[in-house]
Amino acid sequence: MAANTKYKASVFSTLFSNPDTLRELYCALEGVSLPPDIPITINTLEDVLFMGRLNDISFAIGDKLVVLIEHQSTINPNMALRLLIYIGRVYEKIIDNKRMYGAKRIPIPRPEFYVLYNGTAPYPDEKTLKLSDMYESMETLGLPEKSPLLELEAKVININHGRNEAIALRCETLRWYSAFVAKVRDYEREGLSLEAAIRETIGYCIEHDIMKEFLEEHGTEVVSMLFGEWSLDEVLEVRYEEGREEGREEKQEEIALNALAKGYPLETVHDITGLDMETIERLASR
């Protein structure tokens, strides 16, 4: 399972860096079958300067569909807006911009959006996030509310172990990933540190033939990737719990420096800390 190791990746995005695996995942999410000869083209956005991914997974199915999938372990009500920004950049990437100024209509692939959630906070099996739910009310302007002229719907699917089992049964990679995450949490509940829990889980899964080939190839990377991801998630959760009190900028800059050191893109650091982009760029240039 080849992955682009030039860029910082997550365990999830590395697992699903193969067109065949993405085909299996999409078919599981939609409950459909795709002919094996339809090409899957990966077009995930990459931040060359900061060696990170802007989004988790983006791929085209033939020239008819473009699918964006985000993996989240924290609840984020802003995913529809983030996905709107991502899809615009994906279209810029896959469409010849010069054709937009021509006289002929350009056919573009239909977009579909998914957020796969595996956090510990309670969440339903499935939920739809809408961009229109984020719009400001027109009531304060004394104007009537209108149907939105710009909409984006993202389907959030809970992939925790034991949830949405019909989907898990149709995608072995997703099922094993969910089992892996559940096992790490089991070991943590037994009192192991996060790093020790990850290492124990890798050994357990290899012994029980769960993602065995992937873990034997990427074992050391998995420890580093998961430890970095989950540590950052914990920071994010604490930040939302504490709010944005005055006088916390110094602490937020410290968090930003740690995130930048781990290779996270500037936009992700902005989402985590709430610092303005000018400050984050200054910190990144240190």
Image (cartoon, grey):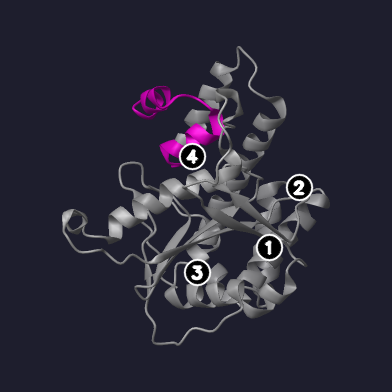
Farthest residue, direction right: 190
Tell me where residue 87 appears, x and y as whole percent. Answer: 41, 53
SS of the residue under disc 3: helix
Asked whether the beta carbons under mark 1 and mark 4 sit within 8 Å of each other, the answer is no
Q: Is tag 2's residue or tag 4's residue first in the polypeptide sequence?
A: 2
Mark closer to the observer (2, 3): 2
In the image, what residue type sits under mark 3? Glu
Under mark 1, the amino acid is Ile
Across and down, in percent, residue 152 comes to 51, 52
Residue placed under numbered mark 4 in the picture: 268
Determine contact: label 2, label 3, CB under 8 Å.
no
Q: Give the extent of the magenta segment.
A: 262-286
Pointers 3 and 1 in contact (CB under 8 A)?
no
Distance in Å between CA atoms under marks 2 and 1: 13 Å
Question: Which corner quadrant of the image does residue 171 belong to?
Answer: bottom right
Mark 1 burial class by Cα count in 10 Å: few <14, some 14-19, many 20+: many
- Residue at the image point whose x is 54% and y is 52% from the top: 225
Amino acid type assigned to the residue bearing label 2 in the image: Ala
Q: Give the residue at mark 1.
A: 159
Q: Earlier in the sequence, mark 2 or mark 1?
A: 2
Look at the image and tell me whether residue 204 can be seen. Answer: yes
Q: Is mark 1 on a helix, strand or loop?
A: loop
Please tell me the numbered disc located at residue 217. Answer: 3
Q: Mark 2 points at which residue?
A: 121
Q: Is residue 59 above or below residue 248?
A: below
